[in-house]
Amino acid sequence: MSMFDGIPEFLAVAETQGFSSAARRLGVATSQISRRVSDLEAKLGVALVARTTRKVKLTEAGLTYYEYCHDIVNQLDQANEIATAGQGKLNGTLRVTAAGDFTETHIVPALIEFVAQHSELELEINHDTRMIDFVEENYDFAIRFGTLPDSNLIARKLSDHPYAAAASPEYLEKFGIPQTPQELTKHQCITTTYNRWTFQHNNEDINVSVKGKVKANSIKTLISACKSGLGILYLPQSTLAENFEAGQLVPILEPYWKCRGSTWIVYSDRKYLPARSRLAIEFLIAKFR
């Protein structure tokens, strides 16, 4: 039995609080995890894990052993990464959870660009907005939009998102251009199920309840309806940028546009980040700075 036999399995059990969850993380059978941990305990002559019917807990010896092993393995990973850094080699799978239109149009292409620079690196993206357990689910980082809840996670801003009001040239020619947000009550507006729009002027919010013939929860549907002349739209400027450049939509009420949120890159508060995570994070931040 080598010095490190059983340690990866033990760390996975400790961090996921279960043999089955540890097996899922490592992609092996639960019986293999159990056998490896038992062999490790036999070698050390001490119980590391207190097994119960619901979940496992570390013994006092297990807690101490985990702290030392966790630091040693992280430092070994870091040493391996430093040794290969000069060769520019990143490997493994970059696992990211992300969602939202800005992610689809901007973040994903940037991640693909990053991975394309590293021939041994793979990319896995899960489009999801739920809160995740970075340890249990083994994600490198998450992309999230809006106001983030307080947590022990590290959050770094990628981009702010001012909202832009827009309409098709045909609509504006037929119905005129509103000069203030309040005038939107006299216009057809294309909305999601939420029909209260917030603008800003002189650092004060202006809330307007709007209505129209089209409601949808799909960004593509909203933009298509707007380009067809069915009303005025209010979405993140980055989402509408291509339509503005193509002349398909016209920006309106620009003095009143409001920043409605930010996109953040969120990751676990770990002392040692894998090189793939660290470099991907810095790449994205530089890309959107």
Image (cartoon, rainbow, N blue to C red):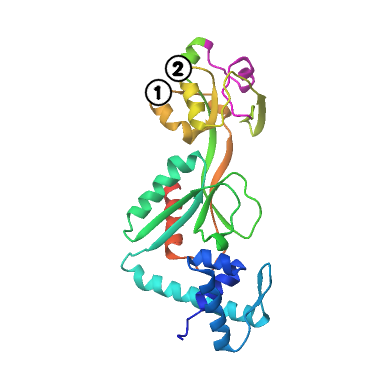
Residue furthest to the top: 174
Question: In the rendered structure, which amino acid carries the disc numbered 2?
Answer: Pro
According to the image, label 1 marks what residue? 247
Q: Residues within 10 Å of mark 1 (few under 14, many from 20)?
A: few
- 30 horizontally vs 198: left or right: left
* Identity of the residue drawn at 49% across and 15% down: 171
- Magenta stretch encompasses residue 187: yes
Q: Estimate the x, y position of residue 169 in percent, counting from the top left.
A: 45, 17
Q: Estimate the x, y position of residue 115 in percent, counting from the top left.
A: 36, 54
Is residue 40 or residue 227 the one in the foreground? 40
Residue 268 appears in the rendering: no
- 278 horizontally vs 201: left or right: left
- Indicate the quadrant where residue 76 lies: bottom left
Q: Residues within 10 Å of mark 2 (few under 14, many from 20)?
A: some
Q: Estimate the x, y position of residue 207 in percent, counting from the top left.
A: 67, 28
Question: In the rendered structure, which amino acid carries the disc numbered 1?
Answer: Gly
Give the numbered dot on residue 169.
2
Query: Is disc 2 in contact with disc 1, using a CB cutoff of under 8 Å?
Result: yes
